[in-house]
Image (spheres, rainbow, N blue to C red):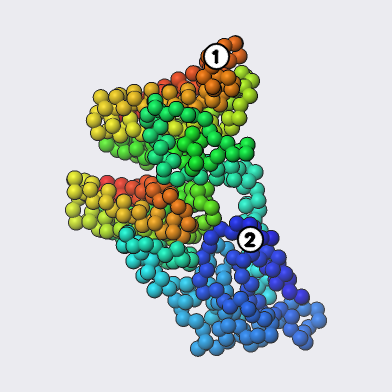
Amino acid sequence: MHPAGLAAAAAGTPRLPSKRRIPVSQPGMADPHQLFDDTSSAQNRGYGAQRAPGSLGYPAASTLPQAAFLADPMSNMAMAYGSSLAAQGKELVDKNIDRFIPVTKLKYYFAVDTLYVGKKLGLLFFPYLHQDWEVQYQQDTPVAPRFDVNAPDLYIPAMAFITYVLVAGLALGTQDRFSPDLLGLQASSALAWLTLEVLAILLSLYLVTVNTDLTTIDLVAFLGYKYVGMIGGILMGLLFGKIGYYVVLGWCCVSIFVFMIRTLRLKILAEAAAEGVPVRGARNQLRMYLTMAVAATQPLLMYWLTFHLVR
Amino acid sequence: MMQSQQPYTGQIFQPTQAYTPVTSQPLYGNSFEDEPPLLEELGINFDHIWQKTLTVLHPLKVADGSIMNETDLAGPMVFCLAFGATLLLAGKIQFGYVYGISAIGCLGMFCLLNLMSMTGVSFGCVASVLGYCLLPMILLSSFAVIFSLQGMIGIILTAGIIGWCSFSASKIFISALAMEGQQLLVAYPCALLYGVFALISVF
């Protein structure tokens, strides 16, 4: 009868090595009606070094008084139950997190390296010389961003977003308008605009009934690239005043416009258009207008989210 | 139930795996003399702490991937408190900000590293590395006690120390997680985090 042992063994993972357990059953029980053996008067057993339950990982060897406390089978079982509960909880989270956040799909977007990031940033600021915008495929799955500069990634948008919030805080700080809750306000308003954009584009894609392999995460990635230009504009505005801000922002707006058109054309428009054939037909016209509309909102939002930061 | 990819956790002073239950004596016996020393019980290994500190302080020294095998939070706790104490010496009572920013930063780095690396990391490992690399920031805030950092020298010093911290942190992360070609990518979010700490020190 080792309920504690069973429970812990069932939930045991290599990270929780087998614990030492005080044997619960004693030969020769004193009182047949007693539910648990009375071991309080038994000689003390040291517990030895053992791993504490949970993720801390500090060994907790007990000294004499603790051994007496833990010798009590009730608390012993409670502790084993608690640790098994924690392990089960963790497994539950690990199993179910995939339902809400597609972790494996997200991992694709973060498989980047420094060379890719450098080339992509160069492309965002100067997309005019790049010839081939097609994403390479490998047996029906797109190649990881590490191997193809045209593939979308989420590292740059995520870092750009956080940097934008911090740089906005810096800009407000230099104008003596800074307070920590303003930082949260900036972050949430930028996030709200992003969500709105994504929903609007998804809605219009649905209405135009376009057959595209553009996933939501892809869309978030593409829409997040404008934060790079915004950061550039704000930094130049901080260093060189309004002139620097307008010059750099104007340049980044045009670049992101061209970038978005060239990237989305391949995703939204039909294959014919992607090969450079002139677009004809009402359906293709509509898609072209949609692409242009998406690309045109980028500069507008870039200006809207930054003009109040540069005085 | 085994998972195919185990997150990377530390192990320190694990009891010997081969033991027969019930019949054998426990490892550390019954009597008072056989108890393990207190530091060993608490898991504080000064030698390892010193080695890790040296790794942080020599940014150009190649890091050994196995030093992060133990999830040691004692060192980082000491460094956080020391950082708060040096801020206190400069007249800024901002322990709350330090703890809050460390927590959010550790959480962010934990999510990012789990998404970017092949093997996962545990939260304790991330917190431990980021805490150890806070050491140069303590130097910065102690400078702030003596002279104000808002001039040109202060800016250069701040930038240098942020670079030092994030370079060490990224070096330890990529050697422990075997991520190639991503050192700058890991260093950038670390630099953002330490930049916020530097902001607290400077302003």
Q: Residue at x 25, y 58 (%)?
A: B142
Q: Is B79 positioned to the left or the right of B7 in the image?
A: left
Q: Residue at x 63, y 24 (%)?
A: A211
Q: Is A296 positioned to the left or the right of B20 in the image?
A: left
Q: In what quadrant of the picture does the C terminus of chain A appear?
A: top left
Tag 1 or tag 2, which sits nearer the N-term?
2
From the top left corner, tell me how far across and down residue B86 is, in percent. 28, 59
Q: In terms of secondary structure, where does tag 2 sit?
A: helix
Q: In terms of secondary structure, where does tag 1 sit?
A: loop
Examine the rendered structure and indicate whether residue A89 appears above or below residue A112: below
From the top left corner, tell me how far across and down residue A106 is, in percent. 56, 42
Residue A210 in which image quadrant: top right
Q: Mark 1 belongs to which subunit?
A: A
Residue highlighted by disc 1: A279
Q: Mark 2 belongs to which subunit?
A: A
Give me the C-alpha separation between circle 2 and circle 1.
58 Å
Residue highlighted by disc 2: A87
Q: Name the one closer to the observer, B177 or A272.
A: A272
Disc marking residue A15: none
